[in-house]
Amino acid sequence: MATPSPSYTITLRVQIPASQRASSTVVTAVAEAGAAVTAVDIAHSATDHLVVDVTCDTVDAQHGDQVRDALDALPDVHVLKVSDSTFLMHLGGKIEVRTKVPLKTRRDLSRAYTPGVARVCLAIAERPEDARRLTIKRNTVAVVTDGTAVLGLGDIGPAAALPVMEGKAALFKEFAGVDAWPVCLDTKDTEEIISIVKALAPVYGGVNLEDISAPRCFEIETRLRDELDIPVFHDDQHGTAIVVLAALINALKVVGKELSDVRIVVSGVGAAGSAIIRLLEAQGARHIIGFGRNGALHRGETSDDPHRQWIAEHTNEEGFSGSLVEGMAGADVFIGVSAADILTGDDVATMNDDAIVFALANPTPEVDPVEAGRTAAVVATGRSDYPNQINNVLAFPGLFRGLLDSGATEITDELLRQAAVAIAEVVGDDERNPAFIIPGVFDPRVADDVAEAVRTAVSRHPDIASVPVSEDEEVGA
C-alpha cells in the first residue's frame, strides 16, 4: 500500500463505550486499516459512552472509506461523521483582502476615500508612473489561468482551477509578501485572453500565467511580454526551469561532472521542457537531446510548433533519432517533464556511472524513484515524500519580489539564470549531498536570495526597468 499522506487527512467522529479498552480498540483498527493516526481527542463524554475524534492520514479517498468501514464493523462503535481536512481548509477560500490603513474616524475616511482620494487620482492622471507608489500596483500580481492544464487534471475549467490559483496567491504572500490575486478566465480564445489581461494590467505590477495549455501558452506569454510594460511570467515554463537548473548545478557538484560535458536527455518538449532546455543552454549545457512522444527531436524535421522547431535546430548535434529508452543509454542526466511510468530501473541502469535522474511527472514520476536510485547517484522528483523535491515555490515568490522592487518591465533569460544560481547557492558546500541538492521550500533564505539576485540583474540592465520611485520621496508636492 502507498504511504498515507496529509493531503488525505480525515477526522472520524466516533461514538464508543465509555472504557479505555474501547478507545484502544478504535485506534488499533484505524492503524490496522493502514492509516497513520495523528490525534485522538474526546469531543463529548457521558456516563455510558464517549464521542471521540480520531484524526489520521490516509492514502486516498477510497482508503478513507475503508477506514470508516473498518470502524463501523466493530461492535458498539458508530461512526457519526467523517471530515476531510483538505476540504475544511478550503471552506470560504484561502485568501482575503485586508486594509493597510486605519478607517476609524471621519478624518480617516476623508483621506482614504472621498473627497481626499480625488487629489491622488489627479496626481496619477498627471503622472501615470506614480501609480506604482500611490496604489497597490507596486506589490500586486495577477495569477491568470483559463483552467485548461491544471496540475495533472487537464482541462477542468476556470471555476475548478480557482482553488489552485488561491493557493498560488497564498504562497506569494507567505513566502515573499507579494499580494497576488486569482484571475480565472472563462474563455479559451487566445486573442480574448490577451485582450482581457491587457485591459486588467493597470492594476498589477506583474502577471503570472498559470496552467494554460500548450501551445497557446507560448503565444499568450510572448504577446503579453511584447505588448505590456510589466513583467509577464509563465510559471509552468520558467519556474520549473529555474528550479531544475538550480538542482542540476548542485547535483553535478555532487557527482563531480561539468554541465558543458554531460549528455542530457529531456523527456517532454512542451511548456516546461522547452524552457528547461533553453535555460540549461544559457548556463552552458552543450549536449542535450529532447524527446517527444515519437522519439528524439533532431535537425531536418519540421514542426508547426516554433518551440519544438527551435529545440530540433539547437540541440542534438549528433543527430540521434531513436526512442527515449534508446537515448537513455550512455546519458549522464535524465530530466522528465512528461508522463508516468515510461521508464524502468533497467533503463536507468544503461546510463553512465554517477547518473542524475530528475523524474518530475506528478503525481507519478516517469520512473519509480526507488528503482532509479538503485543505479543513479542522484534522484529528484516533484513529490514532497521523496528527497530533492523540485518545487516551483522555490522560484516564483522571490522572483516577483525582486521584479516588483526593481520596477522591472521585462524578464530575460539571464535574469532567470541568476535566479537559479541564487537558489543553488543556498545549499552550502557542507550541506550538499545526493539527498540534498535543493533547499527546502520553507527555508527563509531562498526568497530573499532570489529577490536580491533579480534586483542585481535588473540594476545591471536598466533598459529592462522603469525608474523605481523611493517610498520616502516627497509626496503631493
Image: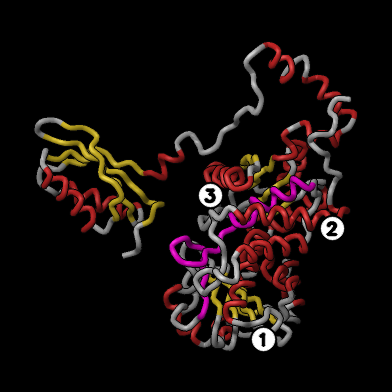
Q: Describe residue 313's horizontal placement relative to residue 49 as left or right.
A: right
Q: Nearer the viewer, residue 220 or 348?
A: 348
| Upstream in sequence: badge 3 or badge 2 | 3
Label 1: which residue?
320
Find residue 126 and report its horizontal and vertical position in percent: 90, 28
Number of numbered discs overlaid on the protein picture: 3
What type is the residue that disc 3 sits on?
A: Ile
> Hey, which quadrant is residue 277 in on the image?
bottom right
Find residue 393 and report its horizontal and vertical position in percent: 58, 54
Tell me if residue 149 comes above or below residue 199 in the rendering. Answer: below
Return the mark for residue 460: 2
Residue at image location 28% in from the left, 56% down from the top: 35
Dot 2 surroundings within 10 Å: few (below 14), some, or many (20 or more)? few
Residue at image location 65% in from the left, 58% down from the top: 239
Q: Secondary structure beneath disc 1?
A: loop
Find residue 204 and report its horizontal and vertical position in percent: 73, 40
* Distance (Cα) linking label 3 and label 2: 42 Å
Label 3: which residue?
156
Residue 390 belongs to the span the image colors magenta:
yes
Dot 1 surroundings within 10 Å: few (below 14), some, or many (20 or more)? some
Q: Nearer the viewer, mark 1 or mark 3?
A: 1
Q: In this picture, which residue range is highlighted in magenta? A: 377-406
Q: Secondary structure beneath disc 2?
A: loop
Find residue 113 and report its horizontal and vertical position in percent: 72, 18
Q: Describe residue 387's horizontal placement relative to residue 335 as left or right.
A: left
* One can see residue 96 in this view: yes
| Upstream in sequence: badge 1 or badge 3 | 3
Q: Secondary structure beneath disc 3?
A: loop
What type is the residue that disc 2 sits on?
A: Arg
What type is the residue that disc 1 sits on?
A: Phe
